Image (tube, rainbow, N blue to C red):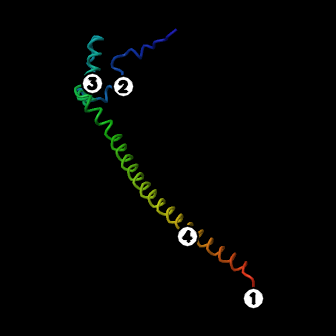
Amino acid sequence: MTVVRPEWLVPNKPGPEIYAPANRRAPERQSDADHIGFLRRQRNESEPGNDLVAERPSELVRRVSGASLEEIDRVIRELEGVREMLRIEGERVSREVASFATLNHSATTAMKVIADSLKQWKETPLRS
């Protein structure tokens, strides 16, 4: 059961309405429809940007997505830089591997020549 105290029903009771500017206060006597209209006008006055959004939704989408697009562009540029660095490093590693392969082939050839020379030297009889 709800209890309604008579002092709550007093229309001249001070409240937050007395602190509002005169043009923002609700009229004393009005119908529910008038009061709803008054509240809607207040809301529309306090949010002037809503009309622009309703008229130009593409503008809202552009503003909201602008920061995201800038971030995506920045990440793309960084990834392109990393890709270029990896390409350059890949070419450098290929050159190094080719150099080591050449050095390995030269070392193997030299070791075979030395082994053959030592074998021939060991097989020859010593003359005394």
Q: Which dot marks residue 15?
A: 2
N-term-proximal mark, 3 vs 1: 3
Residue closest to the eye, 25 or 91: 91
Residue closest to the eye, 61 or 36: 61
What kind of element bears circle 3?
helix
Residue 128 sits in quarter: bottom right
Residue closest to the eye, 14 or 50: 50
Check the image and name the residue furthest to the top. Answer: 1
Q: Which dot marks residue 127?
A: 1
Where residue 58 sits: x, y (%)?
26, 30
Q: How would you rate the neighbour count of disc 2 (Cα within 10 Å): few for under 14, some for 14-19, many for 20 or more?
A: few
What kind of element bears circle 4?
helix
N-term-proximal mark, 1 vs 4: 4
Where residue 54 sits: x, y (%)?
25, 25
Distance, label 2 to label 4, CA atoms, is 99 Å
Distance, label 3 to label 2, CA atoms, is 18 Å
Distance, label 3 to label 4, CA atoms, is 90 Å
